């Protein structure tokens, strides 16, 4: 956590945007702007705003956040594996494999790489709530599942694939029919969230073409 900035995007996102990030009121404005030419990842910006208020320009604060996010994602892996019926030994082994795998090094050591950890947290939470919704049939689990899916989308666009993964899980792993009232409603709500995200992303990209807005 004592590493410095590497000046590979982190100087742009953290240092060059410090005045914007240092204003906590800009959390809502983060959803109105894009990163670069076409990236729309407002929750990444929100995480930088929180760090800027806590640690100012100190890189250690940002690296600590990366570590905490990766640790949280690893713990969620453990919880979900237990939820799926794996033994504690297998769940612990697979979680440790995830936690120390070198392919995830940028997510921990490179400050902008936290986006992957944030995405993992929201996706895993959404999946966990989906499991609870299927098992207990409580609609508040469905609401939490959809909320976390939305947060995942506003973190990184690859979350668009998550509903497909959920459908495959229901069909292949649980051996359930896809065509039923519950899954139809889920499909409609997934689509509605994706459409909302797309419209907000389109507005942000258009606004990003105007320097005065950024």
Image (spheres, rainbow, N blue to C red):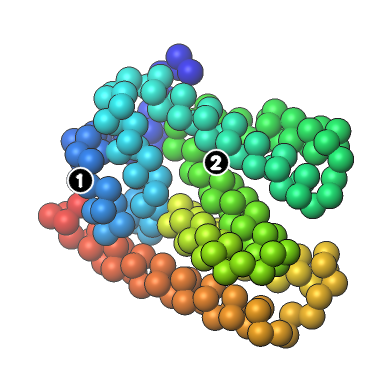
Mark 2 or 1, closer to the camera: 1
- Which residue of the protein is positioned furthest toward the left in this rendering? 212
Left or right, residue 19 beside residue 50? left
Residue 208 in sight from this viewpoint: yes
Residue 166 in sight from this viewpoint: no
User: First in sequence: mark 2 or mark 1?
Assistant: 1
| Closest to the observer, 144 or 14 | 144
- Hey, which quadrant is residue 63 in on the image? top left
Task: Give the distance between the C-alpha atoms of the residues marked 2 and 1, in whole angstroms.
Answer: 24 Å
Mark 2 burial class by Cα count in 10 Å: few <14, some 14-19, many 20+: many
Q: Which mark is residue 117?
A: 2
Q: Position of residue 198 (x, y in %)?
A: 41, 70
Q: Which mark is residue 165?
A: none
Q: Are marks 2 and 1 in contact (CB under 8 Å)?
A: no
| Closest to the observer, 63 or 178 | 178
| Closest to the observer, 155 or 204 | 155
| Residue at the image point whose x is 65% and y is 79% from the top | 182
The number of discs equals 2
Mark 1 burial class by Cα count in 10 Å: few <14, some 14-19, many 20+: few
> Which residue was labeled with disc 1?
25
């Amino acid at each position: 956590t004592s590493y410095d900035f590497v000046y590979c995007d982190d100087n742009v996102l953290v240092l060059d945007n410090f005045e914007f990030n240092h204003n906590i009121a800009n959390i809502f404005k983060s959803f109105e702007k894009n990163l670069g030419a076409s990236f729309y990842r407002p929750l990444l910006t929100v995480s930088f705003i929180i760090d800027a208020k806590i640690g100012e320009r100190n890189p250690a604060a940002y690296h600590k956040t990366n570590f905490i996010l990766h640790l949280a994602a690893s713990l969620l892996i453990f919880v979900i594996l237990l939820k799926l019926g794996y033994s504690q030994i297998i769940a612990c082994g697979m979680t440790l494999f995830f936690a120390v795998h070198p392919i995830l090094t940028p997510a921990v050591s490179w400050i902008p790489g936290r986006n992957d950890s944030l995405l993992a947290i929201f996706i895993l939470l959404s999946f966990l709530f989906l499991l609870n919704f299927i098992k207990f049939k409580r609609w508040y689990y469905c609401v939490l599942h959809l909320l976390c899916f939305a947060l995942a989308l506003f973190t990184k666009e690859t979350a668009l694939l998550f509903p497909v993964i959920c459908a495959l899980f229901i069909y292949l792993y649980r051996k359930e029919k896809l065509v039923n009232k519950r899954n139809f409603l889920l499909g409609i709500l997934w689509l509605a969230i994706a459409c909302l995200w797309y419209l907000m992303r389109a507005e942000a990209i258009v606004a990003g073409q105007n320097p005065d807005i950024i």
